[in-house]
Amino acid sequence: MSGRRPSAFLLGGRRYSPASSLLLAAPFLILIAIVFILPLATLLHESLFVPGPTTAHYARAFEEPVYLRVMLRTLGIAVLVTALALLLAWPLAWVMSRSKGLGLALLAAAVLLPLWTSVLVRTYAWMVLLQRNGVVNQLLQQLGLVDAPIRLLYTQGAVVLAMAHVLLPFMVLPIYSALKGIPEDYTRAAQMLGASAWSTFREVIWPLALPGVTSGCLMVFLLALGFFVTPALIGGPQQMMIATLVSQQVREMLDWPFAGALVGILLVFVLAITIVFKRAVRLDRFVGSA
């Protein structure tokens, strides 16, 4: 039996050749090419070559104030959603990193269960809460804080709140992973050396948790830039974001070249943010050490 273990270990631990790895990944790559790359390439081609070689569609996006406002609004909402998600995720991730057993299981379920629920269902839940005769307005009136229902739905605040709730798990999980990897001996050592709670957080916990924070912020920010369902249902015309504008150009205006230009602008911006982030915080090092 002892002579068979090395061969079994070698069989289970051997490295696949690049050709074998590519063959195993082929079904996934083909699926991505068909459902993502091909439609995206078609839109970008139409934005540059319909009716002929032109950049007029891209110029139109920046020259007309209404489209420029939509792009700036999308950027602003993405920043607000990221900030709110970070504000909500840090305490939860901290408690999770210090919890064990049943408490950790319940907190993890609270974070993960929403991921198994449709975004559409969660968005409609917020509509029920925030509508004119919804739960929030009824509660405010019962507490005597307002005399009549106030407008909560179809506002930028409602869009930011609902999007932050939907994207919260993508912020919690990276921060929890980073906090969980910080040995408790570090904080005890800092306290023994006379560091205050704030100094311990600033000098020990925050720098070590920064990879998780930056990774979570990047994921939430990029997802918020292209979010469609929640802004389309909860936000009104004054809160239109770029994904809703693209849908409007395709479905209502039938202006596919201009929709492709909007997609191209968003794609370039996302790629630029990702490259800057990767160079600034050395994402490869964080992923490799995880």
Image: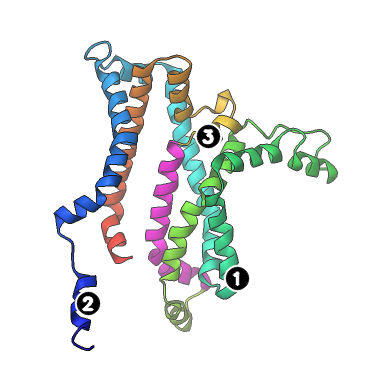
Q: CA distance from mark 2 to mark 3?
A: 50 Å
Can you identify the residue that label 3 sits on? 229
Q: Secondary structure at mark 2?
A: helix
Q: Which is closer to the viewer, label 2 or label 3?
A: 2
Judge whether 283 appears above or below 162 on screen.
below
Q: Is residue 259 left or right of residue 26?
A: right
Question: In the image, what residue type sits under mark 3?
Answer: Val
For residue 253: magenta? Answer: no
For residue 214: magenta? Answer: yes
* Prevailing secondary structure of the magenta residues: helix
Image coordinates for residue 190, horizontal then vertical, percent: 44, 78
In the image, the segment drawn in magenta is 197-226
Question: In the image, what residue type sits under mark 2?
Answer: Ala
Q: Quadrant of the N terminus?
A: bottom left
Can you identify the residue that label 1 sits on? 103
Q: Return the disc, 2 or 3, that comes first in the chain's sequence.
A: 2
Image coordinates for residue 290, horizontal then vertical, percent: 33, 65
Q: Is residue 229 or residue 87 the one in the foreground?
A: 229
Q: CA distance from mark 2 to mark 1?
A: 39 Å
Q: Residue at x 22, y 77 (%)?
A: 8
Question: In the image, what residue type sits under mark 1?
Answer: Gly
Can you identify the residue that label 2 sits on? 8
